[in-house]
Image: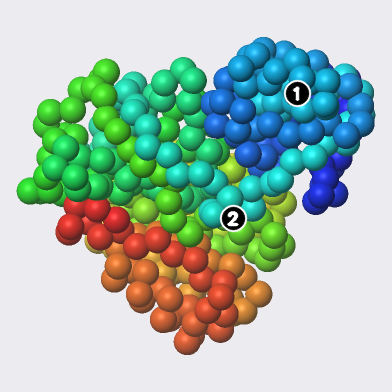
Amino acid sequence: MSFTVTIHPSGHTLAAETDESILEAALRQGLTLPYGCRDGACGACRGKVLSGEVDHGKSMAHALTDADRSEGFALFCCAQARSDLIIESREVRKAGDIPIKTLPARVQHLQKAASDVMILKLKLPASERLQFLAGQYIDILLKDGKRRSFSLANAPHDDALLELHVRHVPGGMYTEHVFAQMKEKDILRFNGPHGTFFLREDSQKPMVMVAGGTGFAPIKSIVEHAIAENCERPIAVYWGGRSRIDLYQLGLAESWATAHANIHFVPVLAEPAADDAWKGRTGLVHQAVMADFPDLSGHQVYACGSPAMIAAAKRDFHDGCKLPEAEFFADSFDFANDKP
């Protein structure tokens, strides 16, 4: 059984099942309410129930007092609908709406996805969750005060573990540590989320996603977020690498297109090795986009990769394919400096 929840002041509505929290229902349907721990402890998701009944669930007394409840307040990460509701809560629609945190995390899992790509999965303390927008990044804080930035590859709703894709840069101080010394259960600290590269959900334009190498990480976050919220906008995903090994999650990207009619996936190799036996597209990934989309005037483009790729795509999409400058969103990964 589900109930209708109307959010003020936006007027957005969502359907909430009886066995899920209002926050979970909102995230499932692409509406992002503020939250922190998702465990009823921090109070970041506190809002008001203007009409209707809720079950407060595991909301903790220090975060939601009896007086708060009597005045109609609830913690939406715990509260479950027991009738149709009208609630009062702000919505997170831009990067500035999300608080930036400094948190510890434990290395939960290390997976060598390719000879030079490590996938890190980080677990936060039980009382913490990181709210972010699909496509944003975090800064790993090093002991000498320096930072190394990595995009979040998991979608915002799937935040039990934070996923990073780390490219090994020979001589790079932090990536050498990741590949040679880091082990599961290590503790690190990070700060975030950061960045203005995130999915613009207020548009209905078709989207073209362009990734180079580990620039696939934030594109993965954006695509999986769009899938989770049942986005029907056409999404064309182009992923480029030098050889087959650079497309380290090729099967995952192919599965998106297989399972969802609105998603089209095109892998592109610049210099396929002889033993790749590659029969797909070759050349520069942004030029493959131009060949398929000679007119981008009605599209949005999300591009992530090396500075050279981003600069060429921005110039050529605008000059050659009529892409409006305001519809080009990019995150440039500067691998040579061991940080984006």
Q: Sequence order check: which comes first, mark 2 or mark 1?
A: 1
Label at residue 173: none
| Quarter of the C terminus within the rendering | bottom left
Discs 2/1, front: 1
Q: Residue furthest bottom?
A: 319
Label at residue 68: 1
Can I make out residue 238 in this image?
A: no
Seen in the picture, residue 286 relative to 264 is either above or below; the reply is: below
Judged left or right of residue 26, residue 155 is left
Q: Residues within 10 Å of mark 2 (few under 14, many from 20)?
A: some
Q: To which residue does mark 2 refer?
A: 94
- Callout 1 secondary element: helix
- The answer to which of 250 and 113 lies nearer the viewer is 113
Seen in the picture, residue 18 relative to 76 is either above or below; the reply is: above
- Name the spot of residue 10 as percent of width and height, x first: 80, 51
Tell me which residue sits at (66%, 75%) in the image: 298
Seen in the picture, residue 335 relative to 328 is either above or below; the reply is: above
Q: Amino acid at mark 1?
A: Asp
